[in-house]
Image: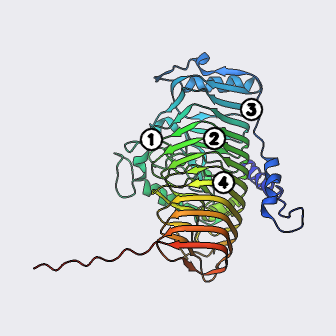
Amino acid sequence: MKHILTRILAAAAFIAACAPDFVSAGGAPDPWAGVPKILARIKAPSFPDRVYPITKYGATADGKGDSSEAIRKAIDACAAAGGGTVLVPAGTFLTGPIHLKSNINLHLAEGATLLFYNDPDRYMPNIFTRWEGVELMNFSPLIYAHGQENIAITGKGTLDGQATDDTWWAMHDLSKNRVPGQPPGSDSRNTLMRQADEPIETMDPRKRIYGKGENLRPPFIQPYNCKNILIEGVTILRSPFWEINPVLCQNVTVRGLKIISHGHNNDGCNPESCADVLIEDVYFDTGDDCIAIKSGRNNDGRRVNVPSENIIIRNCVMKDGHGGVTIGSEISGGCRNVFVENCRMDSPHLDRALRFKTNAVRGGVIENIYFRNIQVGQVADAVVHVDFNYEEGAKGAHTPVLRNVVIENMTSQSSSYAFYLRGFAKSPISNITVRDSVFNGVQRDNILEHVDGFEAVDVKINRVPPKPKIKKKKKG
């Protein structure tokens, strides 16, 4: 009962969050006029002027000794004193999972590396978490906080998850058993997805026991049901799974990071059912979506029913990945009021720049999404990609909604498509506006299926001339 009451109160707090003011001073509709109001609510936490070096509690900087207990003791001492900074000085420190507490800044000095064990046994016992939008009991994330306020991870140091094809990433293999004595990751994932579709009234996520032997890899950083979060400055390498995944959080700042991680499902930053989020000045070079906004999967997401909303993304660089800025696919709780500006996306290994993915099993309402001043170099597929047929397609009863998307001042240099938009006849994509944009080096015609209201104003699409077919000479 306590758990259910906590979730109801959390949901109510998000719903009560003030919506941005979309009206300009002159009275004309101006979505971007709401951005200062959102930013006014996003404030980085401050901390007492107390410092607790982990070396004082026995941490060793040789990268070989286990510093897990020393880090835990430093966090406990700092929390008992009312908060402050837990300092990781220069050196390499080997550790298991780190659980942050309120009013603590985990600060990595320049030259400091936290090197995380890649042995799954170190991330037991199970804790309450979300995995691909479904709540369960699973491995601890590498850095985790639950129900805390005023927490931070800062500094010029490095977080290295040490994931490799022979350790964490091997769990992804969906075709065969690459971890001796354990089932392939697909078995665990399929079971969890079936549980996500059970009737809402019978669901109890704490009875979904995974962890050891089940092969659902943990995210790197996951604050869960927390407020006032700052993640700033650090470099993140070799994550087991999603790298930064705040869930049911409010007032989140992700700033000035370098994220380089090319494993399976290595999304860069996935705010999930969060409100008032700022992601800025981040360099993404990832094995999956650079940024993917989410809000829960299928019936389990509808049970929690908290959207992601009031999210600002600016001044970021996206290199490799499946999508630059993506919304979905775990989006059953909906998403609204997203503002993306002044970002650069460019790589032959970046599939799409702006991506929306959902289906009739996910459902969810995605609305009020705004992009401006986006520079795209090369992408492999489409610059703007919307697909309601992602994975399960139209097989479900929860038709998705995508409406009110505005793209302004976008340029691209090379892509297969400028626009690839596929909605449903019974639920068309609606109100897509593109202004003052140029798409160069486009290889194929636009795909617009079941789109109701596509407006292009001062838009140029410059096709690449088709390559001439070379006739093969007949032998003899």
Residue 263 spot, x, y in % from top left: 45, 48
Q: Earlier in the sequence, mark 2 or mark 4?
A: 2
- Front residue of 59/270: it is 270
Residue 163 numbered tag = 1
Asked which secondary structure carries label 3, the reply is loop
Task: Kindly report the distance in space between the C-alpha atoms of the residues bearing marks 2 and 4.
Answer: 15 Å
Q: Is residue 424 above or below residue 97?
A: below
Q: Name the residue carrying label 3.
A: 103
Q: Residues within 10 Å of mark 2 (few under 14, many from 20)?
A: many
Q: Amino acid at mark 4?
A: Asn
Quick check: 61 left or right of 35? left
Task: Kindly report the distance in space between the C-alpha atoms of the residues bearing marks 1 and 2.
Answer: 23 Å
Q: Is residue 145 above or below residue 47?
A: below
Q: Earlier in the sequence, mark 3 or mark 2?
A: 3
Task: Kindly report the distance in space between the C-alpha atoms of the residues bearing marks 3 and 4.
Answer: 32 Å
Q: Name the residue carrying label 4.
A: 342
Asked which secondary structure carries label 4, the reply is strand
Quick check: 19 left or right of 269? right
Residue 34 spot, x, y in % from top left: 81, 58
Q: Nearer the viewer, mark 3 or mark 2?
A: 2
Q: Name the residue carrying label 2.
A: 256
- Front residue of 86/96: it is 86
Q: Amino acid at mark 2?
A: Gly
Asked which secondary structure carries label 1, the reply is loop
Residue contact at pointers 1 and 2, CB within 8 angstroms: no
- The picture quadrant where one finds residue 18 is bottom right
